[in-house]
Amino acid sequence: MFIIPLLPVRSLPVVAFIDSILLIILLFPVLYFFIFRQSKAQIAELLKANEKLQTQILDRKKAEEALRGSEGRLRYLSSQLLTAQEQERRRISMELHDELGQALSLLKLRLSYIGKKLKSDQGVLRDELENILRYIDQVIENVRRLSRDLSPSILTDLGLTATLRRLVNEFIKHHHNTKITSEIEDIDHLFSQKAQIFLYRIFQEAFTNIGKYAQAKNVSVEVKRQDGAISFLIEDDGKGFDLSHFIFKNGDEKGLGLATMTERVWMLGGSLDLSSQHEKGTKISFYIPVEREES
């Protein structure tokens, strides 16, 4: 180096040190251009990428909040729809009972009166009249059954426990080839009237599906208290179905039964678990927290 001869100290270590310092000073522009400048550009790119990622995260959070808001509104509308549905069922039930039921009873009385006026030689007409009266009795019984299904007054009169037991007995009456075992604990006064109607509808839907589709030989029903909640179980050994295939069907094909059951359980603060296998039956279980403690 041209500066080295001008220095008074000529020791080798000093010369080497000074040489290194001068070399670094001379190479600094090159190092800056090829290394530090490139690192600065990379840092800038990383900062831009991080800013973009932060923006995406913020947008996603906003979308999730909007989705939760939409889900909440949908749940509220669903709740209102189910409530309105129950009110409409109650109205139709009263009309069936009060108007159609009374009209059929009056028709039966009038026909009975006519039967008394028939002469002894009018046996054919008397037999036909007896057939008509028996048919009217069957229609009256069907109207009463429809009225009970639409709005079970027994819930108000006897309570949820008796209503569920009666539902089991009605199933046994109409499905002689199916053996049903039930263990239903007394859960009256633990739920509000609205909750009792929802629970009744869940069981009603489950029994309807078993009666129509399951072709089950055995059905088991359990209602038990468990750690501040009530556990419900409805299980059959019927045809079953492929649950994954069922879930991915569109709404028109699979119906609204399962969706309505799940919605009612959710509205009661519980969770529903459904399991089913082809030719191995179906199991529906759900837990509902107790609304009222027993006095």
Image (cartoon, rainbow, N blue to C red):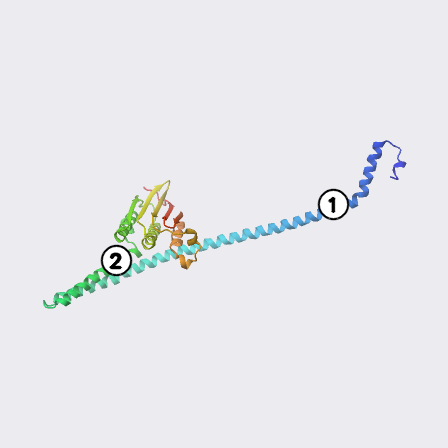
Q: Amino acid at mark 2?
A: Arg
Residue at 43% in and 52% down: 244
Mark on residue 35?
Answer: 1
In this rendering, the label closer to the viewer, 1 or 2: 1
In the picture provided, is 11 more to the left or to the right than 167? right
Q: Is residue 130 above or below residue 186?
A: below
Residue under label 2, please give it: 144
**Secondary structure of residue under mark 2:** helix
Q: Closer to the camera, 112 or 218? A: 218
Give the mark count.
2
Provide residue 174's location: percent of width, then percent of height.
Answer: 26, 53
Q: Quick check: can you spot residue 15?
A: yes
Location of the C terminus (image quadrant): top left
92 or 45: which is nearer to us? 45
221 displayed left or right of 127: right
CA gap, disc 1 and disc 2: 90 Å
Q: Identify the amino acid type marked 1.
A: Ile
Instruction: Please tell me how crowded label 1 is: few (under 14), some (14-19), or many (20+) other residues with Cα within 10 Å.
Output: few
Q: Is residue 268 visible?
A: no
The kind of secondary structure element at disc 1 is: helix
